[in-house]
Image: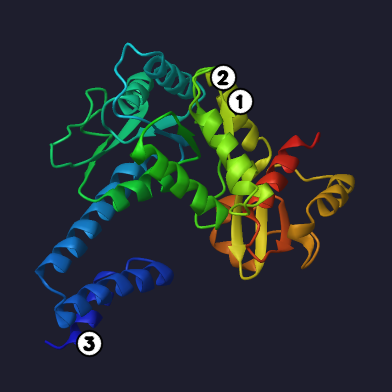
Amino acid sequence: MDWQEIETQFKALSSAHSPGRQRILTDIFRSALKLTQDSPGTLNLKISSSVLKELRYSFKKFAPYKHLPKITIFGSARIPPEKPLYRMAKKFAAEAVKRNYMIITGGGPGIMAAGNEGAENYGFGLNIRLPWEQSANQFIDTEKHLINYKYFFTRKLFLVKEAAAFVFFPGGFGTFDEAFEVLTLLQTGKTNMIPVVFMEPKGFGFWAPMAKFMKDVMLKKGFISKSDQSLYHTFNSEADALDHIAHFYRNYHSMRFVGDKASIRIQRELTPAHLKKANQLFPTLTHLGKIVASAPLPEEENEPDLKSLPRLVFPFDRKDFGSLRSLIDFINDCKL
């Protein structure tokens, strides 16, 4: 049996899917076939196999909850339950659940355990298998909400991909790695624009000095832009942090890039006066063309659930995502 015949049989097996989905499935299958031709070595084949398994299983686990907003909590694995930081993370998670959010953590001890304990039955744990056999914390429903990963990068993908907001409690190298990767993804437009919250008790002295360093050193020396500072906010109160997250979705719904255009979906139309002011306030976003009210673009027809939402559309060169975040804040601040 030649490759063409195998591919034809696979297309027949996947014929129940829509043409678009069938093309994607065929591409996945074709890539797997090419691995047999390329002979990349046993280790590389093991990596490919493990990654695909982790992706498939993660998609399956999250699928029943795709319509529930989730907050990913990051932070140190070294914080014991008696510490104020642990209690703060636990309280934050509990309050988030009361506001109809689910919680996602890295599944381990410390802040991660606090998040899962506070979330009770509404918390995912995305645990990483480490050489010292870190086990998942006891507060995760192992049947429904636990996913174990071999690779940090697939674990990190789902910590980011499934989130409607990121909340960072103090931590070490891992927490800083996650925080700055999230900021980089937002700064470069490689993930959806969502709130980033740095949380600590008042006077704790962890995130506040970091924010000062970013302003006094990174910004002054030209390593970040002034607008990048709008990508993150620091809070000392669980309620204030949750209010900030809720405000982000007060009118803003979602966004999609269509060619060189940005299509911002909102829940309520802006007035002509608000639209005029938006065009005045954000010159780095409007230098290629004005922000205009719009119906859904033709390319958005494959999202029928969002058809009724008003749009704001403008040409976007995808360079200043900090100002894009500020535009979203402006949209949410408008009194309608």
1 vs 3, front mark: 1
Identity of the amino acid at label 1?
Answer: Asp
Q: Nearer the viewer, residue 221 or 298?
A: 221
Mark 1: give few (<14), some (14-19) or many (20+) Cα within 10 Å: few
As drawn, the residue found furthest toward the top would be: 82
Name which residue type carries label 3.
Gln
Q: Check disc 3 and report the residue beneath it.
A: 4
Task: Give 166 or 132, whichever is nearer the viewer.
Answer: 132
Type of amino acid under label 2: Ala
Image-based side of 261 in relation to 138, left or right: right
Mark 1 vs mark 3: which is more N-terminal? 3
Dot 1 lies on which element? Answer: helix
Question: Residue visible at 66% across and 57% down?
Answer: 320
| Label 2 sits on residue | 239
On the image, which quarter does residue 80 sit in? top left
In which quadrant will I find the N terminus?
Answer: bottom left
The image position of residue 121, as x and y in percent, is: 33, 24
43 up-or-down from 213: above or below: below
Residue 52 in sight:
yes
For disc 1, the marked residue is: 243
Above or below 37: residue 309: above
